[in-house]
């Protein structure tokens, strides 16, 4: 879809006025490059702070069961356990096995490694999207946008521990949607026949992997790709439309293949039998209505979390500072604000509700408090906010003579959003440190007991951020006590809080 000539002319006129108002091209250029880089230090600093706090992460919940399995049978043993016994998620088993191979250290380094990976992928995606849209921006702006998306996505959620620090949840619901977005990179770089074939191969392979990694992320991918197929004639230029449709259909086919592998696995059947979560119960009227009520409550929480305005503000800065080169028509990002925003909002709402539908039979009304499952569609929400903000910023640039005040206001909102996340993150860090100290003391004690030949030892629940531990719920929930015993080479652990 070509950019119209009048729009290009308006952008050039506004760019010229902005440069004259600041005092010349040289001054404008250096300033426009420097301050986005400086502003990006705030969300990057938050990521550094969060990664440093990650040294206090210790195993809990499901990981008590993963660790002895990987220790005794290796990563392949855990993949087999997932496929044949637990849930069928072989892709999930691979990623879990990679960090469980290094028991405590794997948990401590997971936040840093996954955070850097997500930031790098989103940074590359932002840069490529701007390049394919033929937009010129200050050098530091793609990093600012990517770091703001990463910061609010990871730390504006109600339970940052389960989003960022709990590896078992993060690989399924936090890293998974970012990996799905990264699959767009080969598409954006596809030019010749060989690169196009590579993009098709990557999207199919990634789709299969995604289908075995996360059911919720797969649902979001299917909804988004369906929108691309159905509305490509409104969104993409004629010369790329057919290829983008083929790419999307092949990605959907990959997700379907992976989902079939998962759903037909013995582990998936075991999980459905355990929770009573079959297709009939999922589509029952009471389940659909319960899912709708739950998703409504989730939306209320999301829409009233003010820190997400940082994503809008980052988008506004993008719209204010981007300049069209006008050398060729934009291939992937035409300026149709209402259409693109509406499609994005529809994809978010539909995928969010469907994710709630498939998780409701397992969690019931607790789906509202199972925040980790929101992340699969929350990334889409954050990106939608950035896109909407970019369209607002573009409109301001075209209709406001001087945009310095608007840029300053957007930068201030970005800063306020990041600073508003520091306090909760610091409080979580303090709680994690307390747990780590208690966990380490108990770890030494249980290892000493096992070394002295004990077969049974007492265990004190040590929880943080609503994480499950053995003997939770006043000792009525024993799981995963046997996994703890296996981890320490004991026959059994008993509840230390219960008097004999």
Image (tube, grey):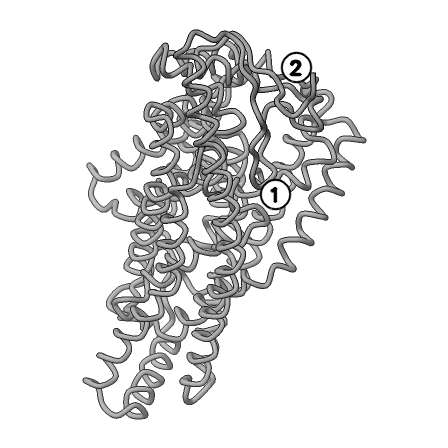
Sequence order check: which comes first, mark 1 or mark 2?
2
Q: Which one is in front in this view, the residue at disc 1 or the one at disc 2?
A: 2
Give the side of residue 120 with respect to residue 365, left or right: left
Taking 239 as reference, is 285 above or below it?
A: above
* Residue 234 or residue 321, whichever sits in front: 321
Residue in front for this viewpoint, 348 or 178: 178
The part of the image, by quadrant, that contains residue 393 is bottom left
Q: Which mark is residue 352?
A: 1
Residue 147 in picture, x, y percent from top left? 37, 58
**What is the secondary structure assignment of the residue under circle 2?**
helix
Q: Residue 274, which numbered label?
A: 2
Quadrant showing the C terminus: top right
Residue 408: x and y in percent read: 43, 80
Residues at marks 1 and 2, CA–CA distance in whole angstroms: 25 Å
Q: Quadrant of the N terminus?
A: bottom left
Residue at 56% of width from left, 22% of height from top?
Answer: 459
User: Do residues under tags 1 and 2 come within 8 Å of each other at their CB atoms?
Assistant: no
Task: Check residue 324 in the rendering and tell me which mark sits there, or answer none.
Answer: none
Residue 468 visible in this rendered orientation of the protein: yes
Residue drawn at x 22%, y 90% as measured from the top left = 24
The percent coordinates of residue 346 (x first, y second) are: 60, 50
Residue neighbourhood size for the residue with mark 2, other residues' Cα within 10 Å, grouped as few (<14), some (14–19), many (≥20): few
Residue at left 49%, top 72%?
413
Crowding around mark 1 (Cα neighbors within 10 Å: few <14, some 14 to 19, many 20+) is many
In this view of the protein, which residue sits in the foreground, 413 or 225?
Answer: 413
Query: In the rendered view, would you say 68 is above or below 3?
Result: above
The x and y percentages for residue 188 are 30, 48
Q: Is residue 114 above or below residue 418?
A: above
- Say if residue 230 shows up in the picture: no
């Amino acid at each position: 879809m070509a950019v119209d000539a009048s729009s290009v002319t308006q952008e050039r006129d506004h760019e010229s006025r902005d440069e004259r108002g600041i005092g010349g091209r040289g001054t404008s250029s250096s300033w426009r490059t420097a301050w986005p880089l400086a502003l990006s230090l705030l969300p990057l600093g938050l990521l550094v702070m969060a990664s440093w706090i990650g040294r206090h992460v210790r195993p809990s919940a499901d990981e008590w069961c993963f660790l002895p399995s990987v220790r005794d049978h290796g990563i392949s043993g855990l993949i087999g356990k997932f496929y044949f016994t637990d849930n069928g998620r072989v892709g999930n088993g691979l990623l879990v096995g990679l960090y469980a191979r290094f028991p405590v250290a794997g948990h401590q380094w997971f936040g840093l490694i996954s955070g850097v990976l997500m930031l790098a992928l989103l940074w590359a995606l932002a840069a490529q999207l701007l390049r394919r849209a033929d937009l010129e921006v200050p050098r530091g702006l793609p990093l600012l946008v990517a770091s703001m998306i990463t910061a609010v996505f990871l730390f504006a959620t109600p339970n940052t521990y389960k989003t960022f620090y709990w590896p078992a949840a993060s690989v399924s619901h936090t890293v998974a949607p970012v990996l799905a977005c990264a699959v767009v990179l080969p598409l954006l770089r596809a030019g010749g026949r060989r690169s196009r074939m590579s993009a098709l191969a990557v999207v199919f392979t990634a789709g299969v992997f995604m289908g075995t990694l996360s059911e919720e992320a797969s649902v979001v991918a299917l909804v988004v790709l369906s929108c691309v197929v159905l509305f490509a004639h409104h969104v993409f230029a004629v010369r790329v439309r057919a290829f983008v449709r083929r790419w999307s259909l092949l990605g959907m086919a990959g997700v379907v293949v992976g989902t079939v592998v998962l759903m037909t696995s013995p582990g998936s059947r075991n999980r459905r039998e355990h929770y009573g979560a079959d297709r009939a119960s999922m589509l029952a009227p009471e389940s659909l209505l319960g899912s709708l009520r739950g998703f409504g409550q989730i939306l209320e929480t999301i829409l009233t979390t003010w820190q997400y305005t940082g994503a809008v503000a980052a988008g506004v800065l993008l719209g204010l500072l981007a300049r069209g080169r006008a050398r060729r028509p934009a291939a992937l990002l035409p300026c149709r604000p209402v259409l693109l925003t509406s499609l994005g909002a529809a994809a978010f709402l539909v995928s969010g509700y469907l994710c709630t539908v498939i998780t409701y039979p397992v969690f019931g009304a607790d789906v509202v408090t199972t925040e980790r499952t929101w992340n699969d569609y929350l990334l889409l929400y954050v990106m939608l906010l950035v896109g909407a903000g970019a369209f607002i910023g573009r409109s301001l640039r075209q209709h406001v003579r001087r945009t310095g005040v608007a840029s300053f206001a957007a930068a201030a909102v970005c800063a306020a959003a990041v600073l508003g996340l520091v306090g909760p993150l610091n409080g979580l860090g303090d709680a994690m440190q307390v747990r780590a100290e208690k966990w380490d003391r108990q770890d030494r004690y249980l290892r000493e007991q096992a070394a002295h030949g004990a077969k049974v030892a007492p265990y004190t629940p040590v929880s943080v951020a609503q994480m499950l531990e053995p003997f939770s719920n006043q000792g009525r929930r024993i799981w995963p006590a046997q996994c703890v015993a296996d981890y320490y080479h004991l026959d059994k652990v008993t509840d230390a809080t219960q008097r004999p």
